[in-house]
Amino acid sequence: MAKFTKETFIEGLKEMTILEVKELVDAMKEEFGVDPSAVAVAAAPAAGAADAAADAPKTVVLKDAGATKIAVIKLIKEATGLGLVEAKALADNGGNIKENVSADEAEKIKADFEAAGATIELK
């Protein structure tokens, strides 16, 4: 028996009527116990869930200030509005820099801090 390729199958589908395609889907359900339309429907919400997670509010967390702590302290002061003592304590101990920010803003803050040598985590 010759191998039946994906391309051959698709070419055959192009020549079928809608009724013939429906009958093919029904035959696949019966033969293999698989509903091809259910797979397509199930895949769509999974993609939407990934988009929703990417748009969810983020928390920017300082893990380590790195070697250039003074530059990181300046960035903390700019990002949070904290005073020098509070910003230095945050640089020394780590912690949340900003909470509930958009994903875009969180990525920008992360890039700025990483450029200064800090280690940042987004939650």
Image (cartoon, grey):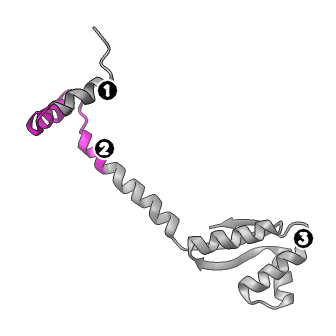
Q: How crowded is mark 1: few (under 14 residues within 10 Å), some or many (20 or more)?
A: few
Task: Name the residue tied to disc 1.
Answer: 7
Which residue is the site of mark 2? 39
The CA span between labels 2 and 1 is: 20 Å
51 shown above or below 8: below
Quick check: marks 1 and 3 in contact, CB under 8 Å?
no
Q: In which quadrant of the rendered view does residue 65 lie? A: bottom right
Measuring 40% from the left and 60% from the top, which residue is drawn there?
A: 48
Q: Nearer the viewer, mark 2 or mark 1?
A: 1
The three-letter amino acid code for the residue at tag 1 is Glu
Residue furthest top as drawn: 1
Helix, strand or loop for disc 3: loop
Up-down relation of residue 53 to residue 90 (above or below): above
Tell me if residue 101 comes above or below residue 10 in the rendering.
below
Assess whether residue 38 is covered by the magenta stretch: yes
In the rendered view, would you say 34 is above or below 72?
above
Q: Tell which tag, 1 or 3, sits nearer the viewer.
A: 1
Q: Give the residue pinned by disc 3.
A: 68
Q: Is residue 14 left or right of residue 63?
A: left
**Type of secondary structure dominating the magenta stretch:** helix
